[in-house]
């Protein structure tokens, strides 16, 4: 097991090298450079030449790539061309927002997705089954910007129950330690800030949860249906176990593997940032940060950000693979 | 009966492990259920508590002061005014920093700022400025001639140790490189500073009033170096407090400000990327004012009794650039035909919610030197067809029409505007295929002259005519790959007039030169000026003295909130 993990971690090196190369090439292949974006409508010949020179954009591409790699190896992600802020600082300030939102959304998606999927499978063809599966279809297909605005309109403007956007109210002050507002509020015992942070989390995490929730619900249902027809379920019932034990211990645990895979993939994807949700809810996450950086051709931020997200994605996949063993002891890694 | 009864203990004994397992499993699951039920109850209780706390304190103003929350779509890039070009940053720095000269609150006429008076030498190459006395930076250090020299040296000299933290784009574009036109800055005495120029520069004073040339505290620049952009210190009415990236920037009143004390105790700049979401925040009362309104929302906002709509006088131009070097556009008749084919008024009604003025000159009417005698080409498809026939295209031709990928105040719905122009042109026989790229590519290809018809625009910097006419139509600016004259209009006579106007300091003489240039430009019609748009600032009714400035950034020093 340990060997397996070490091997997987070593495999990270070529993967990340490949990602760094792709990220570098792709962002440099699109026409336009940061100098043009920064000067915009007002790019004069001298200004452009001067800016390109000072940004090092005149060097051949392979020189720029090697310089970038060299810096990364020393743990230096460089500074943003647009803001002059160190890329690591930008990642550190934006990632917690994404992480917080992702955890909240995944919590909703997993709790409600698995429950709905399980009930739908157990009560196949019942009203609940039909309604929840149609709901899941709607959830997957609903444009998030529309749903987001709808949620804001209903809960913030009409009912006034929840704040429309951002992470904290302007009047709320919170000493930040981890930049995860809920955790910081708990750590500092700041109850008003905790309430405020949680209230701000509700709408964006609901909007963000719709797609993973629907996918998890559908996956749970189909996987459960398959398992429920297996012989060992009949055996479990025959030996007189209560239906709850049959469903939760014998069926769900075995049906869980494909669901776990989907959860891992969804979690990884959400951690990469959700541009739409972050835009509608003014959520200062990593997706929007990358989107702005790509539009501005802010090379260091794009490259650093993609590398970071790729690393997370690979690590989460590794975690999922390890969890497999827990759910299915038949699996052996060597 | 006894026979079977004997067997019971045996059956019981044999089945014992199964029973125990079953019991254990059930107990375990009961425990788990209890945990889940407890958790659910907790969530419910928390929910009730949360909704009970609803609304309270959310809008509670900070004790003993008025907080003004202003929202826009993007965050500031940096807070060192010399190193930014975006409106989002300058909006903030304009509250912290002050310039040597100021614009009047509603137009671009110049009034004293940190300098109280100024004088030009006879040859126009020397400017002597007298500085305001008794002004201090927010860090307590004095503002004086040495501080002015420090700032200019930092901006203009590439080998200056403090020429860091960015690329000083505005300095190089207004003063022509490093050091550019400003040869030297001399300290005459504590309150007098002298600028030595390489040549007379007519828009010099107007340039000094641009928010980007805000005077920074030398002590703070020396202290923070590359990180000055996160620790701005100026002489302005508001002091920087904190910045949470992509969330909010907080400023507080500068209690030792030399001028009248602001009514606001705190300003919060919030980033709310989505236009609709931002308007909802304004309506729910979590922000006080905003920019960036969807044109479709203009009517509902105007009828909202709790909101006021403020119009920013136009200092911009949305235009259709015609690539004058390409066939068939090298024939002025074809360009005039295009001008006659486009219904500008319909465009403004449809896509600017009526918030714009049809443009007949490249220069907006809010800037002096505007030639109002010029008669615009009328919207007249029949005339357009005639002109096309004269040019040898009785059946029209096919070409490409480039649509901007991003919305700008001068081009709020670029794709829809392109489609409307496409329809207009089709009526006179010019078939167009609409193409678009992402913003950086769009600019790059335009500067390289790869386009035919190209929708574009310009927002003025300093309120000087040179800033529009020379930049957009000067022959010197048609170098492929870096052209700002994307019409590639190369009229020597116009170029000479514009160059001449740059070196005269008398404003009325300059105005005459610009009016003459506009006449020739009108004849040649290198571009079709479409519209001068007005931006909308929406605020709560309780917000007073918020006056949108044509340059795009206004000071909040006089803003008040009525309670």
Image: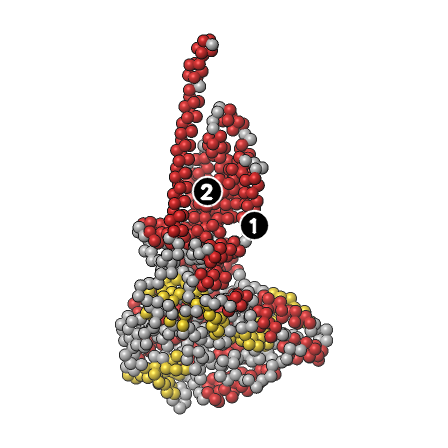
Residue at the (50%, 76%) spot, across then down: B314
Residue at the (49%, 51%) spot, across then down: A207
- Taking the view exactly as shown, the residue that stands out farthest to the right is B394
The percent position of residue B161, horizontal first and vertical second, equals 33, 70
The percent position of residue B301, horizontal first and vertical second, equals 50, 67
How far apart marks 1 and 2 lie (CA) works out to: 20 Å
Residue at the (31%, 50%) spot, across then down: A189
Q: Nearer the viewer, residue B502 or B307?
A: B307
Q: Count neighbours of disc 1 (C-alpha within 10 A) and say few if under 14, some if 14 to 19, many if 20 or more.
A: few
Q: Secondary structure at mark 2?
A: helix
Relative to B175, is A191 above or below? above
Residue B422 in view: yes
Residue A17 in view: no
Q: Secondary structure at mark 1?
A: helix
Q: Which mark is residue A141?
A: 1
Same chain for the residues under marks 1 and 2 in the image: yes
The percent position of residue A219, horizontal first and vertical second, equals 53, 41
- Ranked by sequence position, the earlier of labels 1 and 2 is 2
Which residue is label 2 attached to? A111
């Amino acid at each position: 097991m340990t060997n397996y993990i070490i091997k997987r971690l070593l495999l990270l090196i070529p993967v990340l090298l490949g990602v760094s190369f792709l990220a570098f090439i792709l962002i440099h292949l699109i026409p336009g450079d940061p100098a043009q974006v920064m000067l915009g409508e007002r790019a004069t010949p001298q200004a452009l030449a001067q800016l390109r020179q000072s940004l090092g954009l005149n060097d051949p591409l392979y020189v720029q790539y090697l310089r970038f790699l060299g810096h990364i190896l020393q743990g230096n992600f460089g500074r943003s061309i647009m803001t002059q802020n160190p890329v690591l600082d930008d990642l550190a300030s934006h990632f917690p927002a994404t992480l917080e939102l992702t955890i909240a959304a995944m919590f909703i998606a997993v709790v409600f997705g698995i429950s709905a999927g399980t009930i739908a499978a157990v009560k196949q063809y019942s009203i609940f089954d039909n309604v929840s599966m149609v709901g899941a279809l709607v959830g997957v297909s609903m444009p998030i910007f529309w749903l987001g605005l709808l949620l804001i309109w209903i809960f913030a403007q009409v009912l006034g129950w929840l704040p429309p956007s951002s992470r904290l109210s302007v009047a709320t002050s919170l000493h930040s330690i981890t930049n995860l507002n809920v955790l910081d509020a708990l750590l500092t015992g700041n109850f008003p800030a905790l309430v405020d942070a949680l209230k701000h989390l509700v709408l964006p995490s609901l909007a963000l949860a719709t797609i993973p929730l629907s996918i998890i619900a559908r996956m749970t249902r189909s996987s459960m249906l398959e398992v429920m027809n297996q012989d060992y379920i009949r055996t479990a019932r025959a030996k007189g176990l209560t239906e709850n034990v049959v469903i939760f211990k014998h069926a769900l645990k075995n049906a869980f593997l494909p669901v776990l895979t989907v959860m891992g993939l969804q979690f990884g994807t959400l951690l990469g940032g959700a541009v739409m949700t972050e835009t509608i809810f003014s959520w200062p996450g990593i997706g929007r940060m990358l989107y702005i950086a790509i539009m501005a051709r802010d090379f260091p931020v794009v490259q650093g950000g993609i590398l970071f997200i790729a690393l997370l994605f690979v690590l989460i996949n590794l975690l999922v693979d390890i969890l497999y063993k827990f759910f299915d002891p038949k699996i052996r890694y060597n | 009966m006894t026979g079977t009864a004997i067997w019971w203990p045996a059956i019981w004994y044999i089945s014992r492990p199964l029973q125990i397992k079953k019991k254990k499993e059930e107990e375990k699951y009961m425990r788990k259920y209890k945990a889940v039920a407890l958790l659910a109850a907790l969530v419910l209780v928390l929910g009730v508590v949360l909704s009970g706390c609803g609304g309270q304190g959310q809008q509670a103003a900070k004790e003993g002061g008025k907080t003004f929350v202003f929202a826009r779509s993007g965050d500031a890039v940096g807070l060192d005014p010399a190193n930014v070009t975006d409106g989002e940053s300058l909006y903030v720095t304009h509250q912290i920093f002050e310039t040597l000269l100021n614009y009047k609150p509603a137009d671009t006429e110049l009034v004293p700022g940190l300098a109280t008076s100024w004088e030009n030498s006879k040859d126009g190459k020397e400017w002597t400025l007298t500085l305001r006395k008794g002004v201090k930076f927010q860090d307590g250090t004095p503002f004086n001639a040495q501080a002015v020299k420090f700032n200019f040296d930092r901006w203009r000299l590439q080998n200056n140790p403090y020429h860091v933290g960015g690329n000083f784009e505005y300095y190089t574009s207004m003063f022509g490189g490093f050091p550019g036109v400003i040869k030297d800055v001399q300290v005459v005495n504590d309150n007098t500073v002298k600028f030595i120029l390489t040549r007379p520069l007519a828009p010099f004073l107007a340039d000094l009033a641009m928010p980007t040339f805000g005077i920074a505290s030398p002590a703070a620049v020396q202290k923070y170096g590359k990180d000055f952009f996160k620790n701005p210190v100026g002489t302005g009415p508001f002091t920087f407090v904190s910045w949470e990236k992509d969330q909010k920037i907080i400023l507080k009143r500068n209690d030792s400000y030399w001028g009248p004390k602001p009514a606001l105790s705190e300003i919060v700049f919030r980033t709310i990327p989505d236009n609709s979401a931002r308007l909802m925040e304004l309506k729910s009362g979590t922000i006080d004012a905003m920019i960036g309104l969807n044109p479709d929302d203009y009517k509902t906002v105007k009828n909202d009794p709790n909101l006021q709509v403020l119009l920013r006088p136009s200092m911009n131009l949305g235009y259709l650039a015609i690539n004058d070097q390409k066939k068939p556009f090298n024939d002025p008749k074809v360009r005039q035909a295009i001008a006659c084919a486009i219904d500008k008024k319909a465009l403004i009604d449809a896509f600017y919610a009526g918030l714009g003025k049809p443009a007949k000159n490249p220069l907006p009417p809010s800037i002096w030197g505007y030639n109002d005698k010029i008669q615009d080409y009328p919207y007249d498809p029949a005339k357009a067809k005639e002109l096309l026939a004269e040019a040898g295209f009785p059946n029209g031709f096919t070409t490409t029409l480039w649509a901007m990928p991003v919305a700008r105040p001068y081009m709020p719905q670029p794709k829809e505007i392109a489609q409307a122009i496409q329809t207009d042109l089709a009526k006179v026989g010019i078939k167009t295929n609409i193409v678009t790229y992402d913003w950086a590519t769009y600019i790059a290809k335009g500067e390289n002259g790869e386009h035919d018809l190209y929708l574009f625009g310009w927002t003025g910097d300093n309120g000087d005519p040179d800033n529009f006419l020379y930049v957009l139509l000067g022959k010197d600016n048609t170098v492929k790959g870096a052209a700002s004259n994307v019409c590639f209009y190369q009229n020597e006579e116009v170029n000479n007039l514009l160059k001449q106007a740059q070196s005269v300091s008398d404003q009325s003489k300059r105005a005459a030169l610009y009016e003459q240039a506009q006449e020739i430009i009108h004849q040649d019609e290198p571009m079709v000026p479409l519209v001068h748009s007005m931006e909308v600032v929406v605020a709560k009714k309780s917000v007073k003295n918020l006056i949108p400035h044509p340059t795009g950034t206004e000071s909040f020093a006089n803003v008040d909130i009525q309670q």
